[in-house]
Amino acid sequence: MTWLVKMIAPRWRYSVAVLLLAVLVSLVYGDGWRFDLPLALRNLTGLVLFACIMFGAGVAYAGARLHGAMPWQAIKIGLLVPVIWHLKEMWLVIDIYGVGPGIYAGLQGFYPFYYGLIFVVMGVAHLGCELYRKVTASREPALWYCGGYFFLPLLVVVALEVLGLLLVGTDLFFFEGYLAGYRALFM
Amino acid sequence: MKLSSHHLWRASLVLAATCLAQLVFAEAAQQEVKTAETEKRPNIVFILADDHRWDYLSAMGHPFIETPNIDRIADEGVLFENAFVTSSLCSPSRASFLTGQYPQQHGVQNNFTPWDNSNVTYFEYLKQAGYNTAFIGKWHMPGGIPKLRGVDQFITFDHMGGQGAYYNTPYIINGKKLKVGETPVPGAEVNGYITDDLTNFTLKYIEDNRDKPFAIYLSHKAVHLSMQPDEEAAGRYSSEEVILPDEADSWLSFADGNFKHFLWAPLEKKVKDYAETAVAMDQQIGLVMDKLDQLGLADNTLLVYAADNGYMWGEHRLIDKRWSYEESIRVPFVVRYPKGIKQPGTRSEEMVLNLDLAPTILQIAGLQVPGHMQGKSLLPLLQGDQQEHRSAWLYKYFEDFPYPVPEQTALRTKRYKLVDYKRGKQDELFDLQADPREQKNLIAEPALADTYERLSTQLEAMRESISKPLAVSPIAVEQ
């Protein structure tokens, strides 16, 4: 076990730990019923899995920063679980509709919105890191003073959606606009 | 006797007058007979729900849902316990109810393939036979709102891509778009909750057309997502315990693409919302029945309640329709027709389909069922005929991007179901008698190799036969 831990760079350890936890609980969550595992346990694993997908990026970001990663590196590390989950979602569609539509499926509004949320989660983790730096009176200078950058992706996605509704009268990312794009590209 | 020209002239006049009188009286008499015939035709009220699965009725033994009015239709009519749709998705199924055809014929195969205006609905025949006709409610087929031939009053909506919203949906009447809160029918109240509004329009239509034969297609949004009950029904089942299928769990609505259905709540909570929305709809169905009673029309009215598809609540770890599993393809189908049903309260185990609606309506209206309709009239079953209605039928789901459900064709017999997936999943064979929940795939079972071969051959033959082009005649013919 120790050699396994040593193989993983310290900055990546939290991210990989979240990933392994997500894989483990998804096995229990998805197939536990076949082994008559109690519903309460399966529900619990479902919650943990959800937490890994939604908040794991924050843990991974903070873990990377605490091990000396720069913010951009920490963001990259934090995105490990979200990207793998996203690829898994796309694979479900690729398996049925083929590669092109599968990739397009990965662009549906849920996913940009999800990434927007993930950046917000990492932004919260970033603020936590900055607070930790202040509290511990670290000699290192603040890397980013403005954690607000992390809110930009979500703002952009929401703004585009709202603009689409106001200007064109239809949603761009979720259904009508999105499916119109599908028709234009693949039908 | 010698007749003068004067006498001849008078005799001719008398003869001509007599002939003329005979002609006039004969025509009047004929008109009278025709009017009487027209008046004798039964009224038709078809109520269609959205996504209401077959067992969410108190009449089907559901542990807590209360649907006294749908139950009443069953008590006074026939409940078909094995009713199915040939494609479990709103648009294709709705087109099948209207045309009596498989999606392979009418062309509405998913949420992308548009309704073809050359499709002939049962309304066209009824109109020719003298009916007053109304389509009230959800149309929701690709291609926008059509000019539906044979329909006098077409009240619908295109709000939210045709789905409508439970509250404050703006309506469209005969192509004219109205504002939110504006009624399409003077005298019919719009209170904002869509199930109530559509019912109000229906009640007014019945009142206004009580003296003529009428055909109404009342197409509810309920109980589709977002499964929002009215204030009266909301919270009714909050203290009930929901028992999920063994393979399901509370968070399934977030897993494996299910989150795209926007059910973002614990599954038990959404099941209760669904049940409460159905109860709110049932209450409104009661008002339609009361109106028919008040006006003395019930005896001569064919009343049908059905749904466009079922819904899976965690069975196979799925939350959706689309799939060929039982919970997805089975629908409630209840018929009341006091004049034509021999034994009210009957439960039929025969396999009936959404395609059967149109032929049933036409036959009961006294018209011949056109050859292009692929369904079979249920009238013999309603009259107590014990013969088998059908021994097998074909299910088909066409891909509907971006939902991760593979294209599939299934043959459903009384005992077996064979599912042929186009890609992405192994084919399945289920023995529905031994395994009604379809948990054990027998496709590789050596003991069933012959059965598999037989069903496979039958599936291919049916796939071919139902897709053959059919000549459509829009001319109504009396029986």
Image: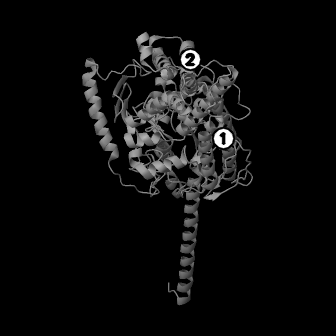
Q: Which is nearer the eye, B25 or B7?
A: B25
Q: Which residue is mark 1?
A: B166
Q: CA distance from mark 2 to mark 1?
A: 31 Å
Q: Position of residue B13 (x, y in %)?
A: 56, 81
Q: Amino acid at mark 1?
A: Tyr
Res B467 label: none
Horizontally, residue B7 falls left or right of residue A84, namely: right
Task: Identify the residue at the far bottom of this view.
Answer: B5
Q: Position of residue A69 (x, y in %)?
A: 53, 27
Q: How many marks?
A: 2
At mark 1, the secondary structure is: loop
Q: Amino acid at mark 2?
A: Asn
Name the residue rendered at 42%, 45% in the picture: B103
Q: Position of residue B324 (x, y in %)?
A: 42, 32
Residues at badges 2 and 1 in contact (C-beta under 8 Å)?
A: no
Name the residue rendered at 55%, 65% in the picture: B26
Q: Which chain does the numbered disc 2 sit on?
A: A
Horizontally, residue B351 falls left or right of residue B128, namely: left
At mark 2, the secondary structure is: helix
Relative to B442, residue A93 above or below: below
Relative to A121, residue B198 above or below: below
Q: Which residue is mark 2?
A: A43
Looking at the rendered image, the disc whose residue lies closer to the viewer, 2 or 1, is 2
Can residue B94 be seen?
Answer: yes
